Image: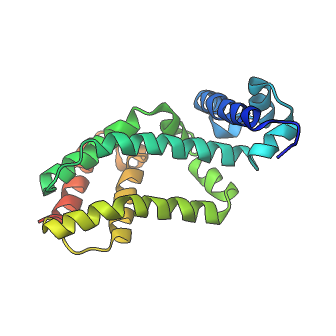
Amino acid sequence: MSKGFTNEEKEIIHEKLLTKGKELFERFGLQKTSITQLTKAVGIAQGTFYLFHSSKEELYFTILEQEEEKLKATILEHIKSPMTSEAIKQLLLYSIKTIENNPFIQQLFQQNEMERLMRKLPPERMEKHINNDTEDLTPLVELWQSEGSMESVRPEVVSGAFRSFIFLAFHQKEIGEEVYWETMELMAESLADRLFK
């Protein structure tokens, strides 16, 4: 990091990049937002951008992870104990509705930018992200299994199943918009019934 910035200045610049980046990405999408637009919005030189992020995709993914953390916190407020099949079904459907109301995450999928993002990010960044999802979910899985309400399924598999369900929400057209919600209800119920007693 440049010696020209104090720690406080670095923090301010980074926060501005996250804030302005979110605004620009929501408005234009990942592909149509340039480094020039980002640096101009923040008031820094292009070279300074690379002191904070290796690419605009990496900045985008950092913002995406922040948005996901907010969503997780909202969803966790609706966790019940002991968990039931009906409660997990409703939780899964609530998760979908919450995501549908998040413009930043919607932009990612409406513009079909997930594939571009995956190509540009280092593989270890995605692997770490997936591992974090599993680590966040593991204590809940262990709790539900210790209470006897959940079948014995590895946390990694539960995390993968939940992630797969969430990804379905971004394929309304492929599923068929007229049957989309009914399909999601069926998938949530099937997953819930398989995992919970």
Residue 159 versus residue 78 in the image, above or below: below
Q: Position of residue 5 (x, y in %)?
A: 83, 36
- At a point 66% along the width and 58% down the height, the residue shown is 119
Residue 177 makes an appearance in the image: no
- At a point 42% along the width and 52% down the height, the residue shown is 167
Q: Indicate how the structure is coloured in the image.
A: rainbow
Q: How many marks?
A: 0
Lateral position of residue 96 relative to residue 9, left or right: left
Lateral position of residue 82 relative to residue 46, left or right: left
Q: Position of residue 44 (x, y in %)?
A: 82, 29
Image quarter of the C terminus? bottom left
- At a point 41% along the width and 49% down the height, the residue shown is 174
- At a point 32% along the width and 63% down the height, the residue shown is 139
Residue 188 versus residue 20 in the image, above or below: below
Lateral position of residue 152 relative to residue 56, left or right: left
Residue 48 location, quadrant:
top right
Q: Nearer the viewer, residue 12 or 88?
A: 12
Residue 124 versus residue 83 in the image, above or below: below
Residue 143 versus residue 88 in the image, above or below: below
Q: Position of residue 43 (x, y in %)?
A: 80, 24
